[in-house]
Image (cartoon, grey):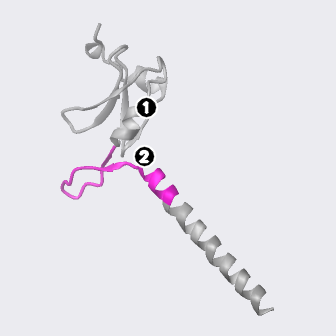
Amino acid sequence: MKGLVRVLGLAALVGLGIVIFRAIRQYREDSTFDLAPATAGAGSQRRSISPELLGILADPGDKGPVELLTDGQGKEWLINRRNGFRYPVEDGIPIMLLEEGEKHKDEALIQR
């Protein structure tokens, strides 16, 4: 009986170790795509898109890459230079709907 209790206790410790290991590994994988903290400002809590996330984002219309642009007022946009669509970024969250891109289209951004 004592041996069985010891084996069960050892199995529980090994199981707990595996759960902790997997949780740490998952946290590290998930934090790769976390939002990067914005530059410190006057109490602003703005966040920006991380470079890793920016690398995988694509325009919903033509599935091509987009780039991050900050305008004169400090507002961030994801832009597609192939069609001039601008997608707003609000608190680090890109609003990548075709309707938003069409609404904020800027012909001056198009590069041929």
User: Which residue is farthest front?
Assistant: 3
7 left or right, relative to 49: right
Per the image, label 2 sits on a secondary structure element best described as: loop
- Choose between 1 and 75: the one closer to the eye: 1
Q: Is residue 19 above or below residue 47?
A: below
> Which residue lies at the image location 29% right of the left edge and 36% below the top edge?
76
Q: Is residue 78 above or below residue 24?
A: above
The three-letter amino acid code for the residue at tag 1 is Leu
Distance between the alpha carbons at the discs numbered 2 and 1: 12 Å
Query: Which of the image's four quarters has the C terminus?
Result: top left
* Residue 102, quarter of picture: top left
- Residue 35 is labelled as none
Residue 68 point in image, percent of width and height: 30, 32
- Choose between 2 and 112: the one closer to the eye: 2
Per the image, label 1 sits on a secondary structure element best described as: loop
- Residue 57 is labelled as 1
> Which residue lies at the image location 68% right of the left edge and 83% below the top edge?
9
111 left or right, relative to 32: left
User: Which segment did they paint magenta?
Assistant: 25-48
Q: Is residue 26 above or below residue 9?
A: above
Residue 30 point in image, percent of width and height: 47, 51
Residue 75 point in image, percent of width and height: 27, 37
Query: Which of the image's four quarters has the N terminus?
Result: bottom right
> Which residue lies at the image location 73% right of the left edge and 81% below the top edge?
8
How many numbered discs? Answer: 2
**Residue under circle 2?**
33
